[in-house]
Amino acid sequence: MKRVIAAASTALVIFGGVAACGSSTSNDTSGETVSTETQKENPTEPKKEAPAEPDAQREETAPESESQPATEGVPTLKVGETVHVETTEYSDDGDWLSGTADVTLVSVKEYNAADLSDDSVASELEAGQEAAAVTFKIKNTSGTEISTTPYNSSITWTGKDGRVAEVATGFLDDTSTSEDLGGTMSLKPGEYVQGVTVVVIPGTQPGKLHIEDDSGKHLFDVSTQGVA
């Protein structure tokens, strides 16, 4: 659900950019009209000044369109790396709670259906899909209780070619994975947990998993290679 909302927000930004360009074109046409009317009095000055107006507009608008990438400033974690994040989660009693955590990417393992046993998520994989087991170590560094929800459910995926796909959580057999991160719902100050999140994603190309909190804040990415 969050991914759909984010995509819609992005679409609005893009269409907004197109509208701005259309406005710039309209201003160019207006400049030409003014130039034509004033040419009778001073034919040399409008020819020099008219091109300058649209050029100035292009210089002002170009940086704005380049300063809005969705993943700007968001790290892509490599195995062994730790990122410090601040999250905002929606609690059961209806309040928004903020906290901080150190999150370490311990490992990323990807499996196709042939790699897995029949009593795992393998039975749910469709052609071209894979299961990715991502192990995190999460330590609560704040003075309040935090949720582990962003690391086991609030996840989306984008492929190298721009393909966007829904992410379904799954499970592996005990021999393939360690503790399921979904079993730990929250951490008190100073506590930590290390566990795995299993997701079903397209496996025919490299891509990135995007981890977000309940407020939709983009925390960090994890790369996948594709083994289907």
Image (tube, rainbow, N blue to C red):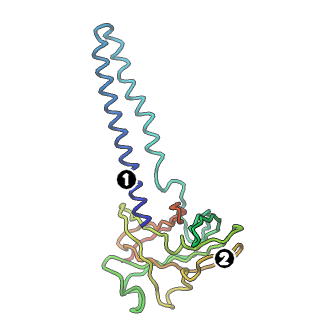
Q: Is 70 placed left or right of 94 in the picture?
A: left
Residue found at the far front of this picture = 93
At 45% across and 66% down in the image, what residue appears? 208
At 29% across and 27% down in the image, what residue appears? 29
At 44% across and 33% down in the image, what residue appears? 59
Vertical position of residue 16 compared to residue 123: above or below: above
Q: Indicate the amino acid at tag 1.
A: Ala
The N terminus, quarter of image: bottom left
Vertical position of residue 6 compared to residue 112: above or below: above
- Can you identify the residue that label 1 sits on? 11
Q: Position of residue 138 (x, y in %)?
A: 62, 73
Vertical position of residue 141 compared to residue 179: above or below: above
Which one is nearer the viewer's eye here, 144 or 102? 144
Report the number of discs.
2
Which one is nearer the viewer's eye here, 159 or 80? 159
- Can you identify the residue that label 2 sits on? 192
Q: Position of residue 110 (x, y in %)?
A: 44, 78
Picture quadrant of residue 182: bottom right
